[in-house]
Image (cartoon, rainbow, N blue to C red):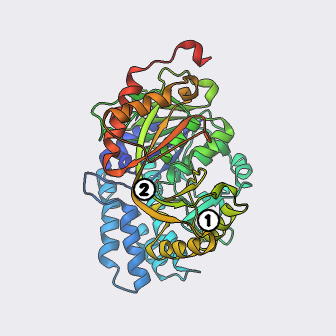
Amino acid sequence: MKVIKFGGSSLASGTQVQKAINIIVADPARRIVVVSAPGKRRKGDIKVTDLLLQLAAAVQAGSDTSAIRDEILARYRDIADYFSMGGSDIIAKLRAHLEALEARQYPSTEHLYAAFMAQGENMNARLIARVMSHLGYRARFVDPKDLGMVVDGAPRSANLLEGSYATIAHYRLEEGEIIIVPGFFAYDKDGNYATFARGGSDITGSILARGFDVDLYENFTDVSAIYAVNPEIVDHPRAINTLTYREMRELSYAGFSVFNDEAIIPVITAGIRVNVKNTNDPDAPGTMIAPTKDVRHHHLITGVAASNGFTALYLHRYLLNKEVGLTLKILQVLYKYKVSYEHMPSGIDDLTIIFDKSQLNATQMSALTDDIREAINPDKMEWFDDFAIIMVVGEGLYARENLIAQVLDQLAKIGIAPTMINQGASQISTMIGVDSKRADEAVRVIYQLSSCEKLPQAALS
Ligand code: ASP
């Protein structure tokens, strides 16, 4: 049995939904289907989830919701019309469902937002199950609640409770039927809607893959493979045929957006392979994400990416290394303001704390600055805002002793001096901090290195 998940662009219109259905029914093992909300039909289009965000804001503000609700329903009506289902009651049902949600009371604003954002997937799964039945297939909508998916944590960044996996494992599919499950959300123990982080339908697919212990998790999107570098930075980059779970995790962290970075964890636990494939080119082999033992590497560097989403706080004080409890004092300040940090490389007299920009606002930054100054009294303290991190990722990285030298050499050739190098915590990645204005150039020269180097077979075994 396989779990097959379709992303938003794969289900954005009637034509796309038809392609997805053709793919589902082409293989009888494809029994568990996870769907996203309709995504962008073209450049500049709006995802249904983002329209729902607007609807939630209007409900919260108590303003008129009819125009935005109509715009959302029009996206589903277009799909229903494509399958000549205009005469059915499905759109009227979806309308009544949204109106009922608008009339409800929620424990908090976050719960209200989660409830609306979940509807992109919820309504799409209901519609697609109806479309498939209408076309004569044995397909059935299944709610995450019926599968026993229970979550806790923040309503818009929920975590699955571990016990849910056992409940999912007990769920029985009927002979020959296909179940259509909405991605991205589940319910907390009180029955409130809660969503995973954005892009979280990948997480649902991964959870079901582990829960049902399937043979393969197929993740259909709109690219034919995961590429070694962003195709917007390098023309026709090399496609990655196979990569390991941990390489995928490091690369998604660095900004490879094809597969959600949290989604890999349930499949790692269960050792299930993930095949990323293209709905518009289903015969292309795509990229296989697999356990380390199953991956034979042929390139020294598997992927290279730059992420601009960081800001760094640099601290200098003589004898920093000698002070007992210094890091503790810094961490206490971060804890006080509920801020997490990404990395903290340090030296004898210097320390840099690197933050995810999206986690910090201006008020927190100035409060952190004041409190840290007070706590450790540095000689110098400075924020670097234009800071990009280049991530060089590859299981082969530690098999070649002079790799870092080669990477730095490439950067030196174009006059880029790294502001930070972090290597060691993970054997398979190296992080290099550079001026964000030169990040793309840095990625390009490092990628050149990846495409010309081949690992000797001896280093692989
Ligand atoms: N529809 C959700 C989002 O836009 C989840 C997903 O597409 O995976 O984030």
Q: Secondary structure at mark 1?
A: strand
Instruction: For the C terminus, give its image quadrant.
Output: top right
Q: In the shown orientation, is residue 295 left or right of residue 362?
A: right
Q: Give how far across and how far down residue 215 sits, in percent.
A: 62, 32
Tell which of 127 and 34 is nearer to you.
34
Q: In the shown orientation, is residue 137 left or right of residue 203?
A: left
Q: Disc number at residue 187?
A: 1
The kind of residue on which mark 1 rests is Tyr
In this view, the mark in front (1 or 2): 2
* Residue at figure coordinates x 51%, y 79% from the top left: 109
Question: Relative to residue 99, is residue 195 depicted above or below?
Answer: above
* Residue at figure coordinates x 43%, y 68% from the top left: 93
* Picture mark count: 2
Tell which of 204 and 175 is nearer to you.
204
The answer as to whether callout 1 falls within 8 Å of ligand 1 is: no
Asked whether the viewer can see residue 368, the reply is yes
Ligand 1 is found in the corner quadrant, namely bottom left
* Residue at figure coordinates x 68%, y 41% from the top left: 269
Q: Mark 1 and mark 2: span between their CA atoms?
A: 31 Å
Q: In the shown orientation, is residue 66 left or right of residue 259?
A: left
Q: Which image quadrant for residue 324?
A: bottom right
Residue pointed to by mark 2: 309
Check if mark 1's residue and mark 2's residue have beta carbons within 8 Å.
Answer: no
Q: Dot 1 surroundings within 10 Å: few (below 14), some, or many (20 or more)? A: many
The kind of residue on which mark 2 rests is Gly
Q: Give how far across and how far down residue 309 sits, in percent.
A: 42, 56
Q: Secondary structure at mark 2?
A: strand
Q: Disc number at residue 210?
A: none
